[in-house]
């Protein structure tokens, strides 16, 4: 497999994945890969047979336009295929449009196909799957509206039901952002450890949450000189929140670790030295 072969295949994979999601991508991937490999083989042969380096460079530059055409062809093919596919709202698997229930999990399938969400409600134009706004009139497409609403409902669930289930002893995050997620990342002596993640937040949002923790009785562990960890003891159990500044991951992405431990009071230093035993 040549360099151009690998580059084109990777590009097509990313483009299709971003446009139509994993379920439809898996269905069309074999055909797209065959087309990509054939195209890249032709480009490789043309470059190898060039008599001069200059001609080879010209052919390689020409491959950029060929790749763009291949990308567009893949997206058009995906759109046409999506007219015959329904996506399960529960498991995300694809099924033929004739099906009423998902053969993978039994969930009732939507009436519309995957492509229907990209038909403009204002002008009726069928847009390429994966686009957010109509290329004919600029109207936001139904699939984009549904995606935003599903994301909003998912965030509400995390800060509502999920937080109450897993992080009830801690004050809720109320500093904006989106893409919320709570995941158990391990255990500490039989107690669960959770991680809360959010996107679209800044350092000041993190500092505001730490102030909220302090207002609710959380404090630095003994001997600590920073707010990297704050904890609170409830009925003999220590509930702590750990974070680092700046963010431990990419900017705008927050990670907070919540630990639950049996509380162990800090040991008191004993008097020592030559006269330590005289003043018990």
Image (cartoon, rainbow, N blue to C red):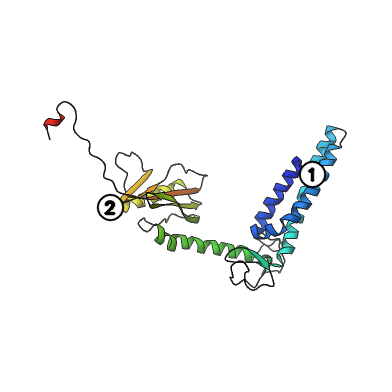
Q: Which of marks 2 and 1 is in front?
A: 2
In percent of width and height, residue 271 lies at: 18, 32
The residue at 74%/63% (across/down) is: 80
The residue at 77%/45% (across/down) is: 64
Apparent side of residue 131 relative to residue 260 in the rendered image (left or right):
right
Which residue was labeled with disc 2?
A: 236
In percent of width and height, residue 178 lies at: 50, 56
Q: Can residue 140 be seen in this view?
A: no
Above or below for 18 versus 106: above
In percent of width and height, residue 137 lies at: 69, 64
Q: Mark 2 and mark 1: span between their CA atoms?
A: 67 Å
**Where's the N terminus, which quadrant?**
top right
Above or below for 217 versus 142: above
Apparent side of residue 64 relative to residue 213 in the rendered image (left or right):
right
Query: Is tag 2's residue or tag 1's residue first in the polypeptide sequence?
Result: 1
The residue at 81%/49% (across/down) is: 38
| Picture quadrant of residue 120 | bottom right
Q: Residue furthest right?
A: 51
Residue 63's tag is 1
Secondary structure, mark 1, is helix
């Amino acid at each position: 497999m040549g360099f151009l072969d690998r580059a084109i295949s990777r590009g097509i994979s990313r483009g299709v994945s971003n446009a139509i999601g994993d379920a439809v991508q898996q269905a069309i991937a074999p055909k797209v890969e065959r087309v990509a490999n054939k195209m890249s083989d032709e480009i490789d042969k043309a470059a190898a047979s060039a008599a001069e380096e200059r001609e080879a460079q010209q052919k390689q530059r020409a491959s950029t336009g060929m790749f763009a055409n291949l990308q567009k062809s893949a997206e058009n093919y995906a759109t046409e295929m999506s007219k015959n596919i329904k996506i399960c709202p529960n498991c995300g698997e694809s099924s033929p449009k004739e099906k009423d229930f998902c053969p993978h999990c039994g969930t009732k399938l939507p009436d519309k196909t995957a492509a229907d969400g990209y038909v403009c409600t204002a002008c009726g134009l069928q847009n390429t799957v994966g686009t957010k706004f109509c290329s004919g009139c600029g109207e936001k497409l139904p699939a984009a509206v549904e995606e935003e609403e599903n994301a909003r409902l998912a965030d509400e669930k995390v800060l509502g039901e999920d937080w109450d289930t897993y992080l009830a002893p801690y004050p809720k995050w109320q500093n904006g952002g989106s893409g919320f997620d709570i995941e158990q990342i391990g255990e500490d002596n039989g107690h669960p450890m959770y991680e809360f993640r959010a996107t679209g937040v800044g350092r000041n949002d993190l500092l505001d949450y730490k102030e909220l923790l302090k207002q609710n009785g959380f404090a630095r562990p003994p001997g600590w000189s920073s707010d990297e960890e704050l904890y609170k003891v409830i009925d003999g159990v220590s509930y702590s929140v750990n974070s680092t500044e700046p963010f431990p991951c990419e900017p705008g992405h927050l990670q907070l670790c919540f630990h639950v431990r049996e509380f162990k009071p800090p040991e008191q230093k004993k008097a020592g030295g030559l006269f330590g035993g005289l003043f018990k």
